[in-house]
Image (cartoon, grey):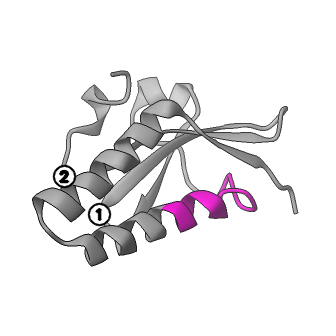
Amino acid sequence: METYEVLIELSAERDLLGILTYISETLKEPETAFRIYSAIKEQIESLRMMALRCKLVNDELYSSRGVRRLSAENYSIFYIVDREKREVHVFRILCNRREWQSLLDS
């Protein structure tokens, strides 16, 4: 089984911190924030062993770039697999309720 190095880009780190902060501080639900944070991190780490298990996104522009989408709780983890370097680049983590196409390049 192929293994990959999982790299979390700065934009995804900011997304994850924003999710954690919003749930724990704004919604005053620190336990829920920790549970969701853990679930997202667990799913990201699972890409190490099965990076290609998720289909390309259903958008011609992004699928042509190799963008894949993995779900965790109510969030979508967007990533690209570099098979040659055996790397997974996680670049955004967005709430499922948001219009993700307009946010991927921001």
Q: Position of residue 69 (x, y in %)?
A: 47, 49
Answer left or right for 81 relative to 2: left
Q: Position of residue 86 (x, y in %)?
A: 81, 41
Alpha carbon of mark 1 to alpha carbon of mark 2: how far?
8 Å
Specify few, some or many for label 1: CA neighbours under 10 Å numbering under 14, 14-19, or 20 or more: few
Quadrant assignment, res 35: bottom left
User: Residue 97 got which mark?
Assistant: 2
Residue under the point 56% across and 25% down? 65
**Magenta extent:** 41-53
Q: Position of residue 83 (x, y in %)?
A: 79, 38
Answer left or right for 72 relative to 50: left
Is 59 a magenta residue?
no
User: Residue 74 got which mark?
Assistant: 1
Single out the residue that lies furthest toward the left.
27
Q: Position of residue 79 (x, y in %)?
A: 54, 41
Q: Quadrant of the N terminus?
A: bottom right
Amino acid at the residue labelled 2: Arg
> Quick check: can you spot residue 96?
no
Work out whether residue 12 or residue 57 is closer to the camera in this orientation and state it.
12
Residue under the point 79% across and 49% down? 4
- Under circle 1, the secondary element is loop
Residue under the point 67% across and 52% down? 52
Amino acid at the residue labelled 1: Asn
Q: Quadrant of the C terminus?
A: top left
